[in-house]
Amino acid sequence: MKQDQKGHSHLPNNNMPETRVFRQGAVASEANALPNEPASEIAGNMTRRSAALITCLAPLLPTIGLARSIKHSAPATHHPTTASHSLHAPTVLRNAAAPPPLVMLDPGHGGKDPGAVGYSGTYEKHVAEAAAAELERQLIASGRYRVSMTRTSDRFIPLEGRVEMAQAHRAELFISMHADALHDASVRGASVYTLSNAASDSQTALIAQSENSADLFGGPHVHASSPEVQQILASLVSEETRRGSAHIASSVVASFQSRLTLLSHPHRHAAFVVLKAADIPSILVEMGFMSNRRDEESLRQAGHRAMVAGAMLDAIDRYFSSTRTGAG
Ligand SMILES: [Zn+2]
């Protein structure tokens, strides 16, 4: 972890790491001065190119990206105990109690990709990172999970790279954390997304477009793949993974229900590239929308993020207690 142990629990007024892109000491007032110009350029690019991009990326599965060497530095995996643990346990240990499940947390965006820019200028990438760090802390503290993070600092990782990390770590659950923006600033509330070839609604289709276009920041990639290969890869998205994803999604929605404002029909689906791990139940959680003043304000508060993380921990507990024996 980049952050020191307690630094994250009480971030300064702006509640975001105060270094990096901030132009000046931001305060939690209505309009803290964060750089907007680059983001609007980015938004322009997205609008122009996202339509083409979604067609290009949506059918692809992460396995295609495996041809590229996995250059992303290995994410830190945190284990609840100090006992040395190996993912490649010798056969003789097979009958021993299963290790705690590994949950892969994926703070959205990072580095040159700021994600959405909030009503008063907050960057989504900072909110995502702070929220994931808090959830990581709570998961570890429970003693019931191992946790890996796709990133623990402000750096860019291509979407496929995120999925590759989850697969390389044999994660049992993949949770991508976001706080995107919508055109309609009045829309607020949390929502949970699972993978589907067809979007559940137009709003979700737009969110998926925006998320998938994160790879624009990574420069040109080769996504060429024959239709046959694509079909084979697509078939790898097993029914079981779909069921697992739906299960954790509804569990998170149920946890949020009593504690958070929710978007209408809070469980939605679309072709999110980052959710395309064939064998790992995956969800994308929009903790709120940066385009909404109240959501942004809430997400800037460490206390609010701790509450969101607590709800997610409960949901993860329920998920594993019903899918896996000996998780606790
Ligand atoms: Zn996002």
Image: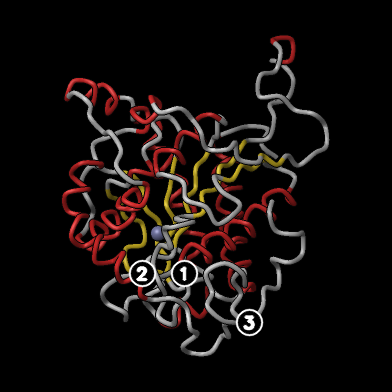
Instruction: Answer with mark 2 or mark 3, whichever residue precedes in sequence.
Output: 3
Residue drawn at 32 percent across, 47 percent down: 272
Q: Position of residue 180 (x, y in %)?
A: 38, 65
Q: Residue at x 40, y 28 (%)?
A: 68
Q: Is residue 311 left or right of residue 251?
A: right
Q: Is residue 89 above or below residue 248?
A: above
Q: Residue at x 64, y 60 (%)?
A: 134
Q: Sequence-wise, which precedes: disc 1 or disc 3?
A: 3
* Dot 2: element: helix
Read off the residue under disc 1.
123
Q: Which mark is residue 13?
A: 3
Contact between labelled residues 2 and 1, with CB atoms less than 8 Å apart: yes
Mark 2, residue position: 39
Q: Rounded to the nearest whole Å, what is the CA distance between mark 1 and mark 3?
A: 15 Å
Res 262 → quadrant: bottom left
Residue that extends furthest to the top in the rendered view of this protein: 92
Residue depicted at 70% across the width and 18% down the height: 89
- Give the quarter of the figure containing the C terminus: top right
Classed neighbour count for the residue bearing mark 1: other residues with Cα under 10 Å, few (<14), some (14–19), many (≥20):
many
Q: Quadrant of ligand 1?
A: bottom left
Q: Which three-letter amino acid code belongs to the residue tagged 1?
A: Tyr
Closer to us: mark 2 or mark 3?
2
Q: CA distance from mark 2 to mark 3?
A: 22 Å
* Residue type highlighted by circle 3: Asn
Which is nearer the eye, 309 or 82? 82
Q: CA distance from mark 1 to mark 2?
A: 9 Å
